[in-house]
Amino acid sequence: MTFIKDLFSTVPNWISMARLVMIPILWVWAVQGKFSWVGYGLVFTIVTDVLDGLSARLLGQCTELGEKLDSFADHLLLLSMLTWLFVYRMDIIGEAGWLLIPAAVLYAVVIIIGLIKLRRFGGAHILEGKPLALFGFWLVIQTMFDIFSPFVYYGLIITWAVHSLVNLLYLYRPDLYNVRQRSLILGLLNIEIEEGLIKYLF
């Protein structure tokens, strides 16, 4: 009962759960071939992804459970988007689509190591992972509307590889990262940002 109570106790958790509830709905639309609906639904998930973290900081409701819930929703959504790309939209990407395979394998290896080492999705919320989210959503939403942009696609591949490698380093050397933003760059520069807009965004 305590877990259920904690789960529904904060605004950010409600927002994260809205994203989780949306995922099976997106699956139904994808299976039915309603790809434009999936595209619009993904816009909704982007909004909830931004709002859960922002509301947690603004309302002072940052919790370990909330972070785990957000990470679970993010990873489940990413795996779903990958599946939709491979199964339904590879014809839009064309021959360059093979690059998704090594990027996905590297990501999977890092996630498995994190689950074994920390028993959770370790290091998922690092500042250097934000570009991956941007390019990932951008690419999948475009393909749902039959659009392909090489810039967005290769941006996804590069940021995905960087995210996986930075995540891997975080699993073994979290001391290199700054505390608040969990950023390798800011950590190496010994910068801890406590004030300003970035405090609420990341």
Image: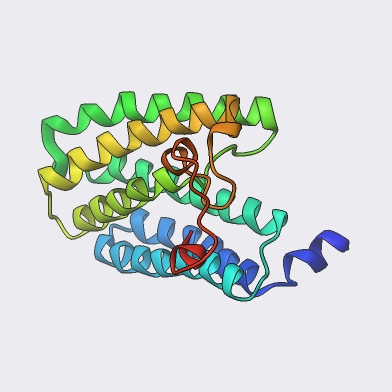
Q: State the image coordinates of residue 16 (x, y, percent, origin top left).
A: 57, 64
Q: Is residue 98 placed above or below 144 in the rendered structure?
A: above
Q: Can the viewer see residue 170 in this picture?
A: yes
Q: State the image coordinates of residue 176 (x, y, percent, origin top left).
A: 54, 32
User: Which residue is located at x 25 percent, y 65 percent?
Assistant: 36
Residue 177 is left or right of residue 13, and the answer is: left
User: Which residue is located at x 50 percent, y 56 percent?
Assistant: 193
Q: Is residue 139 placed above or below 94 in the rendered structure?
A: below
Q: State the image coordinates of residue 138 (x, y, percent, origin top left).
A: 25, 55
Q: Can the viewer see residue 90 in this picture?
A: no
Residue 156 is left or right of residue 200, and the answer is: left
Q: State the image coordinates of residue 99 (x, y, percent, origin top left).
A: 23, 28
User: Which residue is located at x 27 percent, y 60 percent?
Assistant: 35
Q: How is the image coloured?
A: rainbow
Q: Nearer the viewer, residue 159 or 95?
A: 159
Residue 93 is left or right of residue 193, and the answer is: left
Residue 59 is left or right of residue 126, and the answer is: right
Report the label total.
0
Q: Nearer the viewer, residue 56 or 17?
A: 56
User: Which residue is located at x 20 percent, y 56 percent?
Assistant: 142
Q: Where is the N terminus found, in terms of image quarters?
A: bottom right
Q: Is residue 28 placed above or below 128 in the rendered structure?
A: below
In the orientation shown, which residue stands out farthest toward the front? 190
Residue 28 is drawn in which quadrant?
bottom left
Q: Is residue 146 placed above or below 8 in the rendered structure?
A: above
Residue 12 is drawn in which quadrant?
bottom right
